Image (cartoon, rainbow, N blue to C red):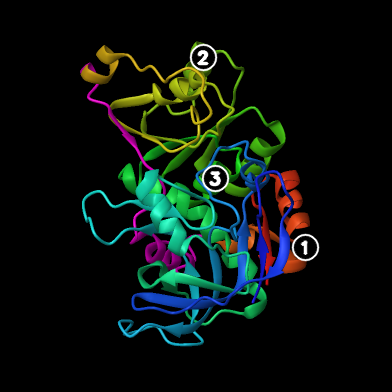
Amino acid sequence: MKAAVLNAFGAPLSVEEVPDPVLGTGEVIVDVAAASVLPYLGEVFSGERQYLLTPPVVPGAGSVGRVRAVGPDATRLAPGDWVLCDPTIRARDHALTPDIALQGLTARGEGGLRLQRHFGSGSFAERLLVPTENVFPLGEIDPAEAGRWTALVVCLVPYGGLLAGGLQPGETVLVSGATGNFGSAGVAVALAMGAARVIAPGRNEAMLAELERRFGTRLRTVRLTGNEDEDRERMKEAAPDGIDLVLDLLPPAAPTTAVRAAAMTVREYGRVVLMGGVGMLGGDPLALPYPWLMRNNVTVRGQWLCPREASPRLIELVKAGLLDLTGFAITEFALGQANEAVAHAAATGGRFALTALCP
């Protein structure tokens, strides 16, 4: 089959003939119709993000396609089924703390690297080998809309954070990083889950205006100044009845002061979920006041990616009409245009304008 290969960090992707995946028990082979191209992939491929990815490798995290073949232990999937492929691969030999690899992108620790050596070839290819439990039926979809369904790959990240934070219908959630790729998707997902109000802070005036246009009165934007104390008060004023949940999705370049300013807006007994990239490339550690945490009974939780049950639940939100994928504009590239696709994704920055590679 043909695939886009990263032969070394800093090198451009090379479209090459690579061996077809070989089916085993507990695995599915999928014909890739559309693969998600994340805005920061260029930083991964250059080595800037220092992800645990071992070249040469076929990159690409998450895709939509049709089942080509299933293993003997699959009882409901069948060739021809349209499916979403979740790139979060977990080891099967430890239920409490499984090793994790993000297929075609990174891994967590040595155990994750071992997973990567088997399932490391990602979705920038004509075919993809995926664990059976990572393949989720979409039902019948328009083949021309396969690229649009890759928006689920982006939405799964904030959805995992909102599930971890226990968001309930009628609550108020603040999405820190709301003007970014995952953050803007998080606004849409939180509203789809029944949030009464979403607070969207940011400094990107154009994107804040776009969020206001899209989501109306259930959304309140906050223009940030960069002053921690002032910004915290501005965010609190946007939710006079209190903020139940703060979801942090700020990128690695953001300062920890921005994380703290948002986190400390949460009400007494509120929850904070940390899911962004702050600190991944060094910098100051996040400091939260012990007395504030204790006396206000605040729960702070880290969350990486999403649980397995998130994918079918998110698919149902779309089918029910609660999460509208037509709000995402998709630009598609052929496999031979893999480098152009990565550059386009970086230039557009996501934010309801997604990029898909369509082998």
Specify which label sits upstream in the sequence, 2 or 1: 2
Question: In what quadrant of the picture does the N terminus appear?
Answer: bottom right
Specify which label sits upstream in the sequence, 2 or 3: 3
**Frontmost residue, 89 versus 268:** 89
Q: Which residues are the magenta region?
A: 295-323
Depicted 284 relative to depicted 161: above or below: above
Specify which label sits upstream in the sequence, 3 or 1: 3
Give the crowd class for mark 2: few <14, some 14-19, many >=20 residues within 10 Å: some
Depicted 53 relative to depicted 269: above or below: below
Q: Amino acid at mark 1?
A: Gln
Badge number at residue 179: none
Q: Amino acid at mark 2?
A: Glu
Q: Quadrant of residue 239?
A: top left
Can residue 194 be seen? no
Depicted 42 relative to depicted 78: above or below: above
Check disc 2 and report its element: helix, strand or loop. helix
Residue at the image position 48 percent from the left and 36 percent from the top:
276
Q: Which residue is mark 3?
A: 182
Badge number at residue 228: 2
Q: Amino acid at mark 3?
A: Phe
Badge number at residue 337: 1
Residue at the image position 53 percent from the left and 49 percent from the top:
53
Nearer to us: label 3 or label 1: 1
Give the crowd class for mark 1: few <14, some 14-19, many >=20 residues within 10 Å: some
Question: Gap in Å between the C-alphas at discs 2 and 3?
Answer: 22 Å
